[in-house]
Image: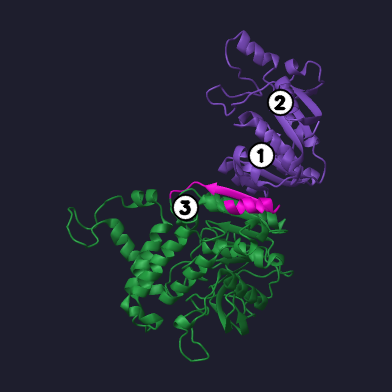
Chain colours: A purple, B green
Amino acid sequence: MSLRPDLAAVADAVPPGARVLDVGCGDGALLAYLRDRKGVDARGIDVLAGNVASAVARGLSVVQGDADADLGDYPDGAFDMVILSDTLQAMRAPAAVLGELVRIGRRGIVSFPNFGHWRVRASVVFGGRMPVTATLPVSWHQTPNIHLCTIDDFRELVTDLGLRIESATFLSGGRRRNGNLANLMAEQAVFVLGRGV
Amino acid sequence: MAATQTVTTDGRFGHDRRVTLPGRFALASGQALPGIDIAYETYGTLNADASNAILVCHALTGDQHVAGANPRTGKPGWWPRLVGPGKAIDPARHFIVCSNVLGGCSGSTGPASLDPATGKRFSMAFPMITIRDMVNAQARLLDHLGVGRLAAVVGGSMGGMQALDWAVAHPDRVRSVVAIATAARHSAQNIAFHEVGRQAIMADPMWQGGNYADNAPPAAGLAVARMAAHITYLSEAGLTAKFGRRLQDRTVLGFGFDAEFQVESYLRHQGLAFVERFDANSYLYITRALDYFDLAAPHDGVLAKAFAGTKTRFAVVSFTSDWLYPTAEARRIVRALNAAGAAVSFVELESPFGHDAFLLDAPEMVRVVDGFLRAGEQ
């Protein structure tokens, strides 16, 4: 089984045998991979009943719920890693959700599409249109994304929240790239966050 | 159930069994019964390491005939979509046990049983029972069957409460729990509806303080109790879709109190059919057992404490139109299990059929239960 490049980058940040919660886990593809390849104790939460049914049918422990509302149910430090994969931009309160990640997990892993990528900028600036790209594939009126941000925006929020960035991975065209001009050149970013600066 | 396998050489296994479990059976109330009978059915074969046993728990007015035809009514089992050959709970893979609850009227000891002390029916002298008592009676039955640890306990409605209570009362004996359309406590509204039913029975002059004759039960009261309860098993949308305001066997209003609307006729039929198969005193005792149910009560009202340290896996399922045990109650269970660090899955399924959805065609429910059970077998 091969994972999407951004999911593979997330998976790489998860140590074997960890207790993991995947927030917005979809049909559980990443969790199943982590369970089968890394022996993680995999848990998930997703808002869609159909996704949850698929994940449970894969043998995963997944709860139907809304990350904006339901993360408060989990006790402090319940997990080693809490994953927010391609989900942050769909949250009503992204800052609160980031705080919850590092409360219920020792570390948070956050991946998101970079709205600062040059193709996105070009689409808005030169095309005069909201972008439709590989990482932002849905047109503006249908997208679940309500809080898009750039890599620099994200770094600023994380600093404001008093969280520590432990590592960052950047992807472009499905390949990893270095951090130079990431805010302009990366299509996706994967950050590992910890508590405290 | 042609494909059902049974261990034919061992009288403990098979259809329409009953076992007498001798010795004092202590109850949660502090009272005791002098030995109990449990009626049950089994399907499939217990494997060599006794690891494939699944206990299926029935709802308030259900019985042990979960998958095979009921020998009294001739009707098929009550959960054919989930239990049977090729189904999620499959006698080819599982050793399936379903018993009539303590206090019931399909062969297990209940208020209609004879009190050995007097030689007469217990009737209202029957001690109060609880969901925990039902669970403990099931545990004794499993001892008798040679089942130490269950692969799963599966139940809907009152059966779901038993499944949850199994994980609390006998945590080392349950690997997985499937709790469908259920709650960890009876709400004030639940208790209120039950009280209406009980008062209808006790107000029937035929009830006679519980000492009615076999051929003269408080049929009118029991039928009314069932009618009131039946409404809570459906939904407004379901009733509207099925009956609307359509008239029964007439085209104009009769301006009387006959069953003019189809929904009235339907409810009357449900009430009368119920009287044929259920004992009024059993209904009083079992509804009371449900009312007493509150898993959090012994833990200062903190449900998570009831599940503290649990190693059991849980799957919780609710239905959108269930207003008897609504999704909010299921979420309360899930929240507590999360707080307890349990491996829990939860899904709220779309259905217009109200509480009864768990007994009807619900392919997503079957998919979830099947996947959950198979994952536990790996």
Residue type pointed to by label 2: Leu
Quadrant (top left/top right/bottom left/bottom right) for the C terminus of chain B: bottom right
For numbered disc 3, what is the local secondary structure? loop
Magenta-span inclusion, residue B343 = yes
Residue type pointed to by label 3: Asp
Specify few, some or many for label 2: CA neighbours under 10 Å numbering under 14, 14-19, or 20 or more. Answer: some
Would you say A165 lies left or right of A95 here?
A: right
Residue lying farthest to the bottom in this orientation = B118
The circle on residue A25 is: 1
Name above or below for residue B281 compared with residue B150. Answer: below
The residue labelled by disc 2 is: A157
Magenta-span inclusion, residue B315 = no
Q: Looking at the image, which residue is at 54% across and 53% down?
A: B329
- Residue under mark 1: which chain is it in? A
Residue A49 % position (x, y): 56, 43
Say if labels 1 and 3 share a chain: no
Q: Looking at the image, which residue is at 25% across and 61% down?
A: B259
Residue type pointed to by label 1: Cys
Would you say B355 lies left or right of A29 here?
A: left
Specify few, some or many for label 1: CA neighbours under 10 Å numbering under 14, 14-19, or 20 or more. Answer: many
| Span shown in magenta | B332-352
Of tags 1 and 2, the one toward the viewer is: 2
Would you say A131 lies left or right of B377 here?
A: left
For numbered disc 2, what is the local secondary structure? helix
Q: Nearer the viewer, residue B153 or A37?
A: B153
Residue lying farthest to the top in this orientation = A126
The circle on residue B322 is: 3
